[in-house]
Image (cartoon, grey):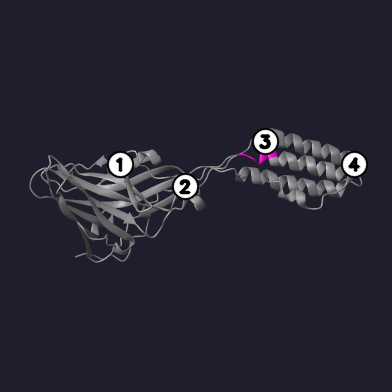
Amino acid sequence: MPLAFLSRSAPVGLGKRLFLRVALALAVVTSGHGHAMPIVFSDGIFDLSDWELSVEFHGTGTTGLGIVSKVPTGGNPDEYRRVSAILNPGPGPVSSIGVRSTYFPMTYDPSVMGAIATIDFAIDGLRPVGQADSGESVAPIVVQGGVYYRGPSEPMPGSGAWTSHDLLGLTETSFFEVGAPTSHPDFSSAGAVIRFGWIFSISGSAGEVERIAGFDNWSMTVNSISVGVPEPGSLALFALGLVGLGFLRRRRSSSPRRARDAASALLAALRVVPNGRTHSPAGDGRRGDSKTNPERSECVSRLGHAPSRSGASP
């Protein structure tokens, strides 16, 4: 509750009583809960040095690799990230591979930036026409404590056109560790640092399968839990109260009754003025005009090798 200004020297007599009454009224007005501004993690340029590539496999004996490159034209618009998933299925009925892209320039620390209420995921995807369906999908991922947690999957149709994929209001139980569906990340203020990204997955049962997809305008918006802080409308009332107090102090010695009347009017106004709230919507966090300096390179991740963020792993 914002009462720090009460530690200053307060006027005596009538002035002090008025000061304390207005201060308490202002404290009540400004004690509402604020809306934390969403934090957006986004990229539409996809420099390879900003992204870590890794792969995960499902199915005994499954192998494969992931290949990524930055394509300077043909995105939505301009450059985009091209991902190729190559699957060599094991002997089981169904095998799959997931090619993960994890963003490195920014992280979210719940202990400093606040507990996470929800996450909104958005990405544009493109699959070429003519590719047979192999269960292609895209899903958001969060990485915490070295563990990858994936969110709900969105199917990717082979339409040959850019398609928007949006998942809103994801909570910590929306994400799970692969192979341990009851294991979830910790979005509370006690949680470890988090990174964000997405995973492109395909599946198959016989013979080598290779599928290619393009991705652009990736964003993950973190909506943190509101905390008890003064809101802009309340701060305006606070400033108004301080101005009124200064006026009362100047006038109290010459006209105590007038000062009491003015204080009563101010208190009445504070009672009827609503606790104004403002909402600071996050932008869509997408590319804007930031696409510059096109370049093209490739990055490969194979089974048994550490993830790579630039160049190619052997």
> Which comes sooner in the sequence, label 3 or label 1?
1
Q: Which residues are magenta?
A: 28-32
The three-letter amino acid code for the residue at tag 1 is: Ala
User: In the rendered image, which quarter contains the C terminus?
Assistant: bottom left
Q: Which residue lies at the image location 28% right of the left edge and 48% below the top edge?
A: 124
- Residue 43 vs residue 160, the one in the foreground: 43
Front tag of 4 and 1: 1
Front tag of 3 and 1: 1
Front tag of 1 and 2: 1
User: In the rendered image, which quarter contains the N terminus?
Assistant: top right
Where is mark 1, residue-wise? 180
The three-letter amino acid code for the residue at tag 3 is: Val
Question: Disc 4 versus disc 3: distance between alpha carbons?
Answer: 26 Å
Where is mark 4, residue-wise? 256
Question: Disc 2 versus disc 4: distance between alpha carbons?
Answer: 48 Å
The three-letter amino acid code for the residue at tag 2 is: Pro
Query: Residue 189's x, y, as percent?
Result: 49, 47
Where is mark 3, residue-wise? 273
Where is mark 2, residue-wise? 38
The three-letter amino acid code for the residue at tag 4 is: Pro
User: Within the image, what quadrant is residue 184 found in?
Assistant: top left
Side (left or right) of 251 relative to 298: right
Q: Which residue lies at the image location 76% right of the left edge and 48% below the top edge?
A: 6
